[in-house]
Every structure is written in C-alpha cells, then in structure tokens.
Amino acid sequence: MSDLAKTPESSEPPELREASDSPGISETPEPAEAPETSKSPETSESRGTVASSGVDPRLLVRETGFKGYWSEFGRKVRGGDLGSLPVLVGLVVIAIVFQLQNDNFLSAGSVANIAVYSSGLGIMAVGIVFVLLLGEIDLSVGSVAGVGAAVWAVLDVNRGWNEWLAIGAALLTGAALGALHGFFFARIGVPAFVVTLAGFLGWSGLQDWMMGGEGSINTPSGSVVEDLTNYFFEDKAAAYGLALVAVLAYAASLLVDGRRRRAAGLPARTNGEVVLRTAVVAVLCFAVAYVLNEPAGARGLPLALVLFLAVLVVADFVARRTGFGRRVFAVGGSPEAARRAGIDVARVRIAVFALSGMLGAFGGLFIASLSGGATKSVGGGNTLMLVIAAAVIGGTSLFGGRGKVWSALLGMIVIQSIQQGLNMIGMANAIQYMITGAVLLAAVVIDSVSRRTQKTAGRA
C-alpha cells in the first residue's frame, strides 16, 4: 500500500474534508517522491514527530524555505496545476500592451469604468462558477437577469411597491427560476444543457411579455437601482479604508488558517510567508485605492465594486468554509462517490442552480442601472457569452470539481480590460468579439491540457 493511502485524508468522506483540501482550491503541496532516508538526529526526530501526527513528510516542503516553494511550484507546473498563473500573466500583458497604445488606459476614469462594468456581469459569473464546479452549464442566466430586472421595474415603477421589496421580489424570482431548472435536471433527469436552453428561450418570452408594448421602464432618479452603478464614495477615506480592511481580513484569515492547521498537526505557512503574502495584497489594494482617489478626474470608490467584492467574499466563504461548499466540490468531482458518501446530490444541484438564478437576477439589476432602466434587451446580446467566458477564463474548470470563486473577478477583469482597451484605440466591435473568443478558447485549451497533464502525472 502506498504512503498516500495511509494518510487520514484518503479515507475521509468528501463532505467532511477541510475546505482547504477540496479539489481546485487546495494550497497544500502535492506529494512528490519520498525524501531520502537521513540518519541525522534532527531528521529522525522530525520524522518521528510527523509520523505521530499522521502527516505525510512529503507535504512539508514549505518548511525548507524559498527553495522548497520553488521546487513545489515547478512540480505543480510540470503536473499541470497552473492555478491562476495564466490569468495573472495575461492581465500584466494586457495592461502593458494597452498602456503603450494609450496613456489613459490605467487612468482613474478607465480603472473605474472597468470596475463598474465588471461588477454586474461578475456577480452573474459567480453563480456560473458554482454551476461549473458541478460540471454543468447554465445557459439561462442572461434571460433570468432580464426577468429579474423586469420584475423589479414592474413592481417598483408601475405598481408602486417599496423599492426594497421590489428588489427582494426580483432576487426571489431569480432563485425560483434557477431552482426550477435544478429540479428538472436533478429530479427528472433532463440534461442541464437542455433545461437551461429551454429557460433561455422561455424566460426571454416572459421578460418580453412583462415589459409590455413600450418595451422599457426608466429607472427612477435617486433610486437604489440607479445608485448601483452611478454612486461613488467621494471621500478618500472610503477607498483607503476598504483597502485596509481587505488587507487586515486577509492577514487574519492566513493566521487563523495557520493556527487551525497546526492544531490538527498539519504543515502551516511560516510567518515570513504570511508577511510576504500580506504585503503583496496590501500593495495591490492600496495601489487601486490610490488610482481611484488621487489622479485628476478620479471620482472615488464605486459602490458597484464594493457590492461585487462583498458577493465574492461571501461566496468564497460558502465555497471553502461551509459543508455546502464542500458538497459542491464533492459532487462536481464525482457524483457517484458523493452519493455513496451520503450526500444528497439532487439537493445540492438544485441549490446551486437556485443560487445561480438569484445572482443572475441581481446582475440584471446592475445592467438595468447601467442602461438607465429595464428594457427587453437586458440580459440579451453577448451577456451570456461574457458571463460564462469570465468564469472559464478566470480558471474554473469546465469538467467540474476544480476552480475558485475569485475566478469570476479575474476573468471579468480580463474581459473588461480587453474591451476597454480596444474601445480606447477605436477598434470595431467585431474585432472585440473575435479577440474575446480567442481568449476564451485559449483558456479552455489550457484547462484541457492541464487536466490531461494531471492525469498523466497521476494527480487528476
């Protein structure tokens, strides 16, 4: 029997595993070849300690310092585990290319536009990330967004409902439509592709019928929906304060995670790594806050970005730190294994599609805010393509069980950066579509090659 088979994690049911060990989000180094036997007293003592705690010694590469991390990184790359590396490299390349073409690409106004236009579609992409983690697809998210905007507009503007109640009704409608898709898929056995394609057509008709003959309902001035994409926190303390909160929260999460892992006898990040990671995040956060606040023409922190980040944080917590999130990864990795482990697979699938529908409706309100009201075109056009592309480009696998919620942020920033840059240099929409399609294809190719490499390396 191999060493890996002796570890506690290998026999543990999927739904009981720690979120940090879930497929696609694990930051624990992958096992490599066993180290050579050493006769030194320190090595023997360390080996005895590891054996008593049940931790595979090959998981302790991080304790060897920078050299251990570099060898771990090389092993992951050779094994096909690229993570977010292609996306981050792509963002750097995009920023350099378009900044050289137009000096205003990284200006305050440009960055704010990217943030605002990314928010609504990015929130919808978060729901798609959960669906993709199941290894399924949701083609109805654009139509559900249109129905959500229509429900809010009809109830708030035409019927005189309290705006918050109308917004709540729109979100509940989206969740109900998503749950209906999940029911037909999980309980009846209709493929998700067919169910959501039917929803795409059917809910588009419902949206058209609800909007009536006029086809549009303008957003009331000063309303909550109007403020979603038009309100900016002009006080500089807002952007810098949010950056500080984000850095402190990130550092706290690293420290808590390290304490939990040490208590469980597992290898944890060193203090030096915690400081380095926190410093990198701090530089990024405060750099964005500076760009939004200081240059000429800066309008401050967009409310849309705050809401998008809030959705990402909550969704990431649900995916990595709750039983529901672990069940989603388990079902996406192997539905039959999850069923044998006692997970109600059908219930998880229905809940995920309901979540996708609710976030789709929420994103529809952002689109309505940007367009000045609810129209028959909300959620149409290339909305569906952009939302799915953002999740895939960000690194979520199309094959299920592997990905991160933050993929929605990375993927949407890539897409909106490309569109913003091409608009600034006067490129036609047709060229934008072709380039975005090429980027999407590249992301899928990387995902497929990565998965094949992992299978060859015995790590899939």
Image (tube, rainbow, N blue to C red):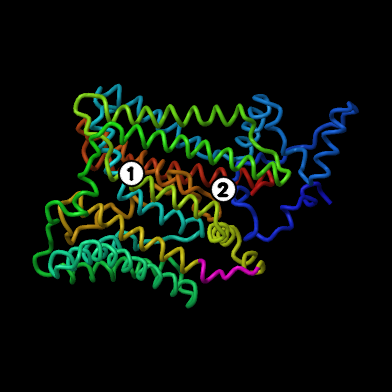
Residue 318 coordinates in the image, percent (x, y) = 49, 55
Residue at the image position 69 percent from the left and 41 percent from the top:
262
Quarter of the view holding residue 333: bottom right
State which region is magenta: 342-348
User: What percent of the width, then of the height, locates residue 236?
Assistant: 28, 31
| Left or right of 348 in this view: 102 | left
88 in the magenta segment: no
Point out the tag, 1 or 2, that comes first from the N-terminus. Answer: 2
Toward the left, the furthest residue is 214
**Residue 44: x percent and y percent?**
87, 32
Give neighbour class at mark 2: few <14, some 14-19, many 20+ (Cα, 10 Å). many
Q: In this picture, is 453 found above or below 184?
A: above
In front: mark 1 or mark 2? 1
Residue 96: x %, y % from top left:
35, 24
Q: Residue at x 59, y 51 (%)?
A: 19
Number of on-image labels: 2
Question: Mark 1: few, some, or many residues within 10 Å (few <14, many ≥20)?
Answer: some
Calculate the distance from the C-alpha at mark 1 to the C-alpha at mark 2.
26 Å
For mark 2, what is the residue? 24
18 relative to 95 in the view: left or right: right
Q: Is residue 175 above or below residue 317?
A: below
- Whether residue 344 appears in magenta in the rendering, the answer is yes
Marking on residue 293: none
Rendered image: mark on residue 306: 1
Image: 189 above or below 408? below
Name the residue type under label 2.
Gly
For the residue marked with disc 1, what is the amino acid? Val
- Which residue is farthest bottom? 188
The answer to which of 42 and 445 lies nearer the viewer is 42
Q: Secondary structure at mark 2?
A: loop
